[in-house]
Image (cartoon, grey):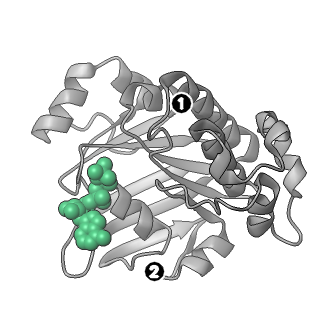
Amino acid sequence: MTTRLECAGLTGGHGSATAFRDVDLTVEEGTVLALLGPNGAGKTTLLLTLAGLLPAKAGTVAVDGATLRGGRPALANRTGVVLVPDNRCLFTTLTVEENLRTAARRTGPKPRTMLEVFPELDKRWDVPAGALSGGEQQMLVMARALIQRPRVLLVDELSMGLAPLVVESLFETVGRIASDHGCAVVLVEQHVRIALEVADQAVILNRGSIVLRSPARELAAAPEQLEAAYFGGHATRTDPKS
Ligand SMILES: Nc1ncnc2c1ncn2[C@@H]1O[C@H](COP(=O)(O)OP(=O)(O)OP(=O)(O)O)[C@@H](O)[C@H]1O
């Protein structure tokens, strides 16, 4: 397997405040890493730093072995890093098709090819994004990410405000996007159980530090370890290399 995303000693935050420190992550192509942890742990800030939207205070981020220049989001995006932000950021007055057109690249897939992954959007093709249901909006958000042919897909709280059944189906799609398109997915999620079902590996961030790493399946079977990492922040590392 190829290492798609790697960060080493990554430290970052907002202004002079440090939100996370000394984070090492490796995500292989075609796999999903669940980045979990309590509110305020630093998960979103870490994603923004991986996407180049915030400069790192220390450490490196590399995609397919090439180190990215920190704080350069357009460059990171051209390298294949695509962020799915937690506030959706759709153009609400533009239709589904128009939203996809804003993200499509000249030499990349055409908007309608996204219907192979999200067929439910076909009947909503000419509807403004603001009139879609929450689940449909998130499908559009994922389609808008996929049309950019991501090598690294950073997904922040996809489930926010959605019914559990909708979340399960969306997460299945995320898993398929990783395996079919060979991208590395980092999934920040509060729905821990569903996230662990789709993820291959999991890390728990607490107060800015990684306090637990584990294959996702093992962690799903060890709720006490999960709880200790969330509330105590001092669980043991089960697999220091993952
Ligand atoms: N725009 C900002 N300016 C300054 N500090 C911020 C900003 N956004 C977040 N922070 C701070 O950075 C720290 C980490 O927040 P972050 O949002 O990354 O955590 P999180 O794990 O994603 O939490 P949540 O699940 O609540 O979104 C917190 O102390 C938070 O108050």
Q: Quadrant of residue 110?
A: bottom right
Q: Please tell me which residue lies in front, 87 or 240.
A: 87
Mark 2 neighbour class, 10 Å CA radius: few under 14, some 14 to 19, many 20 or more: many
Tag on residue 207? Answer: none
Q: Position of residue 42 (x, y in %)?
A: 28, 57
Q: In the image, is residue 169 above or below residue 32?
A: above
Q: Is residue 240 left or right of residue 88?
A: left
At label 1, which amino acid type do we have?
Val
Q: Is residue 234 left or right of residue 187?
A: left
Q: Please tell me which residue lies in front, 193 or 21.
A: 193
Q: Residue at x 69, y 35 (%)?
A: 176
Q: Quadrant of ligand 1?
A: bottom left
Can the viewer see residue 141 in this picture?
no
Q: Quadrant of residue 190?
A: top left
Q: Label 2 vs label 1: CA separation?
A: 32 Å
Q: Residue at x 15, y 31 (%)?
A: 228
Q: Position of residue 19 (x, y in %)?
A: 23, 65
Q: Position of residue 31 (x, y in %)?
A: 58, 41
Q: Position of residue 87 (x, y in %)?
A: 48, 56
Q: Please tell me which residue lies in front, 210 or 52.
A: 52
Report the number of numbered marks: 2
Residue at the disc numbered 1:
167
Can the viewer see residue 166 in this picture?
yes
At label 2, which amino acid type do we have?
Gly
Disc 2 secondary structure class? loop
Residue at the disc numbered 2:
70
Q: In the image, is residue 69 above or below residue 59?
A: below
Q: Quadrant of residue 83?
A: bottom right
Residue mark closest to the camera, 2 vs 1: 1
Q: Is residue 18 left or right of residue 156?
A: left
